[in-house]
Structure formats: structure tokens, C-alpha cells
Amino acid sequence: MTDRPDAPLVTGPATLGLPYHWWAIGLVTLGALAMFMDVTALNVALPSLRTDLGVSRDEILWIALIPMLVLSGISMSVGRLGDLYGTKRPYAAGFALFTVATGAAALAGSFEELLAARVVQSIGLAFITSNLGAISTAAFPASQRGKALGFMAAAIGLGMASGPLFAGAVLEWLDWRAIFWLRVPFFALAGLLVAVRLRDPPPEGRPRGLDIPGAIWLSALLFLLVLAVNRGQSWGWGSATIVALFAGAAVLLPVLIATERRSASPTLALALFQNWGFSGGVLASACQAFGLAAVSVLAPFYLVEARALSIFEAGALMAVFPAVVLFVGPLGGRASDRFGVRAVSTAGLLIQALALAILGWMALDEPIVGITLRLLVVGVARGVFDAANVSMIMGAAVADRQATASAALSTSRSIGQAIGIAIAGAIFTAQATSFALARSGVGLDDAAVKPEALLHGLEWALTASAAIAVAGAAIAWVAG
């Protein structure tokens, strides 16, 4: 650490000719790869997993649902550990948990064993992702925060782009277990590098005291809420289970608020959310995640079932928009340093609204080039938005809440994703089904009607998602 004005919070010696801040960004890249490569790769592998393990479509979705539930539930609590004890230990612990659980997943002999391994994997990912933003911003001066976060956005894009391609290639030659065991040596080495090279912020001024009751109530509330939102369509919004989940979350909310008001070192800093720059940035992030989830989940239905592309071909197309983030992310970060987070984050969401609209309103026989260009615009939107949004959130948080702010970002994305999948998915299903039934007595079971019906459902779902992006842009403008 140095006392120079606008100095980074964390410094360290150069190694192999590289300054410390580039090592920090490299270690953040490894964490982003762990998280986003895992999620996107497993989504591609779900059909193979279902066939091999002999479970239903609804059961296999728990493989993808578990990370969302765990990350939403515990990221804020885990992020608080980074504020209290430094980011290095929880970040390194995350890699250790993730690596061991990835090896266990490769050896799973049943669906239940695989689910258990995914739970531990997801806990490890929560320790990793809740500290990404804090590690990035600590290694750069405040005037270069956008630059640092632009590289973090690029790392996320790399993880999202590589996951489908990695899984598709592996499944062409090997079985689903290889998706797990091939990554074990890589992330074991990554964890070793984190332990050796990452440095903690100085301990002076760190808060003291772990708020265990607050962490429990917060985790339980978010878990119940995200589970209810995600499974509402499948289990029925009026079913006893979904109503009970929402009721449980409603009961826990005042309990959590009362607990945190009494705590000397609360897990959920209520004062932080009274800062509109912080809370508005978190809301804008959730709006963005809503639209990206709609694209990621629904576009493959159009590509595979309406256009009859192979899973690998669809995966390669879906890798376009995160691949673009790899290149646009650093530019977006530099732009936010130069023009301010308000203008750049607002522009990113407006571009996303345009991208979702043009992606939804495609022809049934749209050329592959046209689909690619539309997905490219989605990637540009994310690359422009991400760094500015994270900079807005991290800049609004006080020094002893940087890891909490980073975790809040991860949580907002998970909740936005859950809501996006639920609402956009419900619109997609309802519109596609009604369109098909109006033209055939057997509805979507009629192969002649199904492709056009799926496209109709996609149009409505992505148009609604575009409207959410416009709302997010308004929030970002006011918050900035």
C-alpha cells in the first residue's frame, strides 16, 4: 500500500516482469473462468447427463438450478468474510472447494451424488465470485477503476464463450464426466497461484465481528425467494409449495431487518442500500441479467427446434455474444473512466434493449449471418455496460464494504437471472402454445406449426425483456 494520491489499495512486487495489478487481473480471470465456464458448459451437457443418469427433464434441471440457488443465498454472507478477513483466504478457499468438488462430480455414481458435488462446487463458486470485483478494484487506483473492471468483464466473456465450445468438443469425443475431470488440474494450479501471488488489502480499519444470525436469515430469505421465482412456472404459481416459499420469504424479511439494525457489524448493511448510486446500480444489474438470461435460455429453442441446428452448432452461435465481450469489455471500462459510469452504463442497457428487440423479431428462415450479427450486438451491449455498472456499485460502497458490494453484484445478477428465466420463459411458453393451438388441434406437437410458434413466443419474450432493459437504463441514468 502507498500514501500517494489515487494510489491502489493493494500493491505488490512485479513477478516475471509483470506488475502486481496485472497478476491480480489474471487471478480474477481464473475465477471468472471457474464460474462462467462451469455454468455454460453444464447447460450444454444437460441432455447427455439426463440420458446417462436416467432422470427426467425436470430433475436434470437441478444441475443448473443449484448454482443459482446457492450463489443467490450465500454470496452476500461470503462477501462479508472478505471485508472482515481480507479477500485472499476466501478466494483461495473457493478454488480449493471448487476443485475438489469438480473431481467428485467426475466420479459421481448416481444423480444424487452428482447433485451433492454440485452443491459443494457452488459453495466454492460463491467464495470466488463474491470477491472478483473487490480484488479487481483494489489493485488499481480509483481513476482506473473502469479499466480494471473492463478486464474483469472480458474475463467473464471468455468464461461464457469457452464453456459451450469446451463442452461441445468434449461431448463429441468423450462423455460428460470429462467436462469435470479435464478441469481439475487447471483449477488446482489456479488455486495454487492465488495462494502464492494474491495479496490482501491492509488490515487497518477492517470491521470486526461476524454477524452469524444475519447471515443465516439473509441466506434463507434469498434461497426461498429465488427458488419460488425459478420454479413457479413448473410447480404452479398458485401451488401450495410456491405460496409457502413466498410466505416464508415474506416472514423472514422483517426478521432480517430487525436483526441487522441491532447488529454492530451487520451482514446486510442497510445504510449501503440507502445510497442510490449503490442500490440503483444493483437494480440496473438485475435488469441486464433478466435480458441476458432470456437470450441464453430461449434462443437455443429457436436454433435447435425451429432451425434444426445441432447442439454444437447452436452452442457455437451462442458463444458469439460472450466472445464479443472479451474484446469490448476493456473498451467499455476505459470509456467509463473517461465519460463517467452514468453515460456508459445507460448506453449499454439501451444497446441491450435494441439488441433484444432485433433478436426477437427475426424471420423463420433468418440467415445465419443475420443471427450472428444480432448476437454480436448483445455482446457489445454487455461489454459496454458491465464495467461501468460494477464501477458504479463499487464506487458507491465504503472501503470496508468492498467485498460486500462485489457480492451484492453477484447476487443481483443471480436474482435477475432467476426472474428473467421465470417471466420470459412463461411468456415464451404461453405465446408459443396459444399460437400453435390456434393453428392446430395438437398444438406444439404438430411439427409443421412448431417452428413458427416457437419464433412467435421468442418475439414476445424478448420484446418484454427489451422493455426491462429500457427500465434498467432509466435507473442507471438516475443512479449515476
Image (cartoon, rainbow, N blue to C red):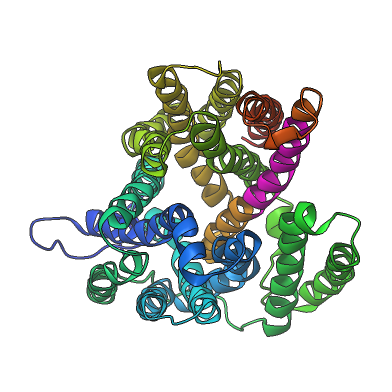
Give the quarter of the figure containing the N terminus: bottom left
* Residue 329 in view here: no
Magenta span: 415-433
Which of 374/145 is in front?
Answer: 374
Residue 247 rendering spot, x and y as whole percentages? 90, 66
Residue 13, quarter of the rendered image? bottom left
Q: Is residue 418 magenta?
A: yes
Most foreground residue, 6 or 126? 126
Residue 185 place in picture, x, y as percent:
23, 73
Is residue 354 a member of the stretch shown in magenta? no
Instruction: Check the image and report above or below for 92 versus 345.
Output: below
Asked if residue 45 can be seen in this view, the reply is yes
Locate the C terminus and report the quarter of the image it occupies: top right
Q: Where, by quadrant of the figure, is residue 200 drawn?
A: bottom left
Give the left or right position of residue 179, taking residue 426 as reference: left
Quadrant in the rendering for residue 104:
bottom left
Task: Give how far across and how far down residue 361 sits, in percent.
Answer: 60, 18
